[in-house]
Image (cartoon, rainbow, N blue to C red):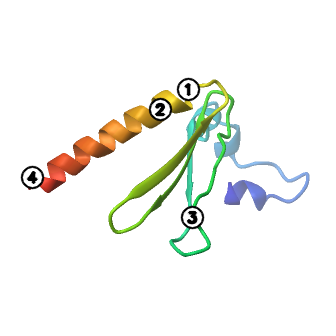
Amino acid sequence: MGLRRMLAPGEDAPEIFVDKAYPTLTRSVLSTSTLPQGPNATISCFGPVVEEGFGLSYQWTEDTIGCVVTNFGGMAGEFAARLESSLGRLYDILASS
């Protein structure tokens, strides 16, 4: 994105930006964001950037991970449940090591 923004108005784009693979490689179905820990940042929300995508905002402390999942298609709950299950499995693996 940075390189694309550096183009001057009317300047020809380098080949990478017109390659047929470029739209696929730059499509973000899962967009994530976080805020640094602190007393003023207790929860945040981050929206999806494509219609069928997911937004995932997350924060962590020493003993918790908090996530907010958003989706335009009503699938945020299912995604969040699967994320919670995956994080639980990861915790179990790390705790047994």
CA gap, disc 1 and disc 3: 24 Å
Q: Earlier in the sequence, mark 1 or mark 3?
A: 3
Question: Which amino acid type is shown beneath numbered disc 1?
Answer: Met
Between 37 and 24, the residue placed more toward the observer is: 37
- Residue 57 against residue 77 in the figure, above or below: below
Q: Earlier in the sequence, mark 3 or mark 4?
A: 3
Residue farthest along the left direction in this orientation: 97
Q: Is residue 28 left or right of residue 6?
A: left
CA gap, disc 4 and disc 1: 32 Å
What residue is pinned by disc 2? 79
Between 78 and 22, the residue placed more toward the observer is: 78
Question: Which amino acid type is shown beneath numbered disc 3?
Answer: Thr
Q: Nearer the viewer, mark 3 or mark 4?
A: 3
Q: Are marks 1 and 2 in contact (CB under 8 Å)?
A: yes
Q: Residues within 10 Å of mark 3 (few under 14, many from 20)?
A: few
Q: Is residue 60 left or right of residue 34?
A: left
Q: Label 2's element? A: helix
What residue lies at 62% left-to-right and 38% top-to-bottom?
Answer: 22
Question: Which amino acid type is shown beneath numbered disc 2?
Answer: Phe
What residue is pinned by disc 1? 75
Q: Label 1's element? A: loop
Residue farthest along the bottom direction in this orientation: 39
What residue lies at 68% left-to-right and 40% top-to-bottom?
Answer: 49
CA gap, disc 3 and disc 4: 30 Å
What residue lies at 58% left-to-right and 59% top-to-bottom?
Answer: 43
What residue is pinned by disc 3? 42
Q: Are marks 3 and 2 in contact (CB under 8 Å)?
A: no
Q: Name the quadrant containing residue 81.
A: top left
What residue is pinned by disc 4? 96
Q: Residues within 10 Å of mark 1 (few under 14, many from 20)?
A: some
